Amino acid sequence: MAEFLIETIGLPGWLAWTTVAGVSAFLILNLIAGGALVFIWAERKIAARIQDRLGPTRTGGRFGWLQSLADGIKLLAKEDLMPDGADGLLFRIAPYVSFCASFCAFIALPFAFDVVGLRLNVGVFFVVAVLGLEVFGVILAGYASASKWSLFGAMREAAQVVSYEVPLGMCVVVPVMLAGSMDLVTIGEKQAGWFTNWFIFHDPFTFVIFWVYYTCAVASVNRAPFDLAEAESELVAGFHTEYSGLRWSFFFMAEYGSMFLVSVLAAVLFLGGWNGPVPVASLLGWSDGTAVTAPYAVRLVGCANLMGKATLGVLVMMWIRWTLPRLRIDQVMTTCLKYCTPIAALMFAGVMLWQLFLPGGLLPGSRSQAAAVREAWLEGEADGAPVPEASVGFVPAAGRQVVGVSR
Amino acid sequence: MMLIATGTVSVAHYLVVGAIMFTAGIVCMAVKRNALGVLMGIELVLNGANLNFVAFGSSYLAGEGRPPLGLDGEVMALFVILLAAAEAAVALAITLNFYNNHATVDVDRADDLRG
Amino acid sequence: MTECLFSAMLAQLPLAAVDWHGLFFLLFAAIACGAAVMVVLTDNVVRMALHLVLSLGATAGLFFLAGSEFVGAMQLMIYVGGTLVLLVFGVMLTAQTQLVALKTPAGDKVLAGILGAALFAVLVQSAVSIEAWRRPGLAEVAAPTATPLGMALVGVRVDAGDSESDRRPPSGYLLPFEIVSVHLLVVLVGAAYLARAKRRRTPRTVELVASVESSQPSRVDAGASESASSVLVETGR
């Protein structure tokens, strides 16, 4: 898009890049905030249905769909309390730390082929790393609240997040190994074609490791049954016991943002990203298999595909939350260190051996033509062959120049 | 402002930033009485050194020629990060043990072995 | 026509001449250095941890700016997300009221300040003394990839040239990589041993506190023994 602004409208480079950055940031911010509104409403309805209740029914008509907006207005109007013994500065900045970490991780997350805020060469690790920073907000909140409940919640969170980063990192490495790249866009593109090309169906080991990833992701975003940091039956409300009003809602938005984030990451890494289960565009002849020549509509459909998969992931998290009881802290640690980590390590080795001995899969030639074409195109791109540049999406591949090399 | 006017970042800029972090770390290690404060000083020192490694290994900062360290700079930085993690884990375990036995983290109180 | 006029007007703005790379460098460098200095100046250990997080996070930004994206991501993931969380965890475990802010004697501070200033002068002098190091960076550089780094870690150097001086002995990193992994394993075992839950610990700790209190009353003041008993409660839990 920046090239479009520079070449067609004639804006100077810095203004074009700034505009593009602003637009991307605006879209991502609204995605998080709007997503939180929708997901909170969905969670209340789903929870109610699982517990044989109705949930919100009155606000905004038939299904109570305005409930989360009404909640938001209530939160805005609430008095902002701070405990007497609290550490003022830390207490104030903690929610923003949490929210910013969740927000920053979205920067490197692709939503369709070229629809990515910043195409980073180490995208996978950037997302996982920044997501891990969210814990600082929780820890600061827990410490600064000057409350025992908060401190206990924060300490549980610290122990849990540090532990779960290990198996999470191992699971994330598997698609990186299969795709031969840490770039999320490349990883997504490598799974084009029929759904059999998705990495989850690559071999039995990846199928297992997907579920390990999902478990660890649920744990690392603090959702039940791993929500020990805010175990409301033991710790009042855990790390956000002393928070109310707008600051509390920032924690909430961060939580829903992270849920969505790990679901998008799961979709990109294992579930084919923006590629649908059936390559409709190729079958209808709209596209010759490479994303560059694909019409704009295909890209939009890809975006919708990814959103659908990610939403499904979030809905499953809600289902788990209202079905399973909370684990004890020692059970959480056991799950991580005695089950997730060894399983992930074994599966990692398994995938490696599979790649070594059966690189073509059990049925050679079962990978569809589309994937082969696109792979060839990706190789060409890596070799620096001229690729026709379609200036669609927020920031094309050269977007890293914003910080990197623009002069 | 000078930097913006001339429009260049060179290795020396990174070295100066690294020097500030290194010095801050050394002073931190010398001054703090809290064992965890001393640990934080160590982390700062390691990061100052890491900045130098990365600066010397960056082909972007090297200008026309090849970077003085090439890939070695980045690899060394990775090793430093890994070893810093290991060091922090052990040091933290020692500190917590000390705290359990003496109910303090003041390094000046750790003089049990003084003859 | 209007477009040309528009862009000409925009070109007049001083902003167009701003070097964004330099600006971001200044921003990250200021955060990194300022937070590092604040770590030294703050007495409250929790604030120190916060400043340290800021400083190391900004350092990761500097790594990104230098084109070492992988090192920057690792800095964020391992250092800030792992090591520092561990450190903050330790701070919270030991943050008793009387330990949060341990005062340092003013004499020590002055002495350390003088030494630090001297060290800083030497470092800066050597940093700016070499002309080659002050050479400006490139305006354009190929997008960095982590592939050469990974190849180097498994023992293949792709950046070595063909000239005679580059034909050094094989300088892969396979052996250091293995050594570091074994080292990490040893550290894992060692840390688990040091911090293990001692099952028969409770009565011994009671004895210890009691003996310390009886033999050296000046050593442990009332507050410390109180916190020692709270340690007991925690380990008992």
Image: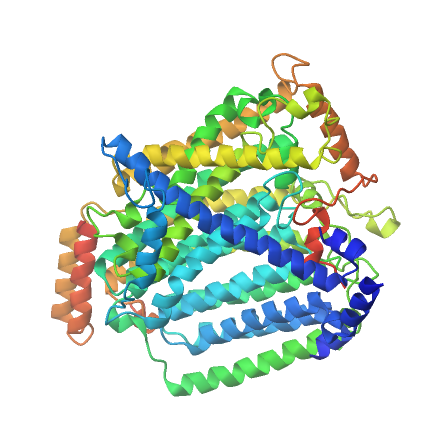
Residue at the image point whose x is 53% and y is 61% from the top? C57
Residue C24 visible somewhere in the drawing: yes
- Residue A171: percent from the left, percent from the top? 50, 35
Outermost residue toward the front in this view = A61
Counting labels gives 0
Left or right of residue A76, residue A16 in this image? right
- Residue A157: percent from the left, percent from the top? 34, 50
* Snapshot quadrant of residue B110: bottom left
Left or right of residue B56, residue B43 in this image? left
- Name the foreground residue: C149 vs C161: C149
- Name the foreground residue: A135 vs A159: A135
Left or right of residue A103, residue A223 in this image? left
Quarter of the N terminus of chain C within the rendering:
bottom right
- Name the foreground residue: A74 vs C22: A74
* Snapshot quadrant of residue C31: bottom right
- Name the foreground residue: A51 vs A64: A64
- Residue B18: percent from the left, percent from the top? 61, 69
Outermost residue toward the top in this view = A363
Q: Relative to A117, does residue C54 appear above or below in the rendering?
A: below
Outermost residue toward the right in this view = C163
Q: Relative to A124, does residue A153 appear above or below in the rendering?
A: below
Residue at the image point whose x is 37% and y is 37% from the top? A336
Residue A182 visible somewhere in the drawing: no
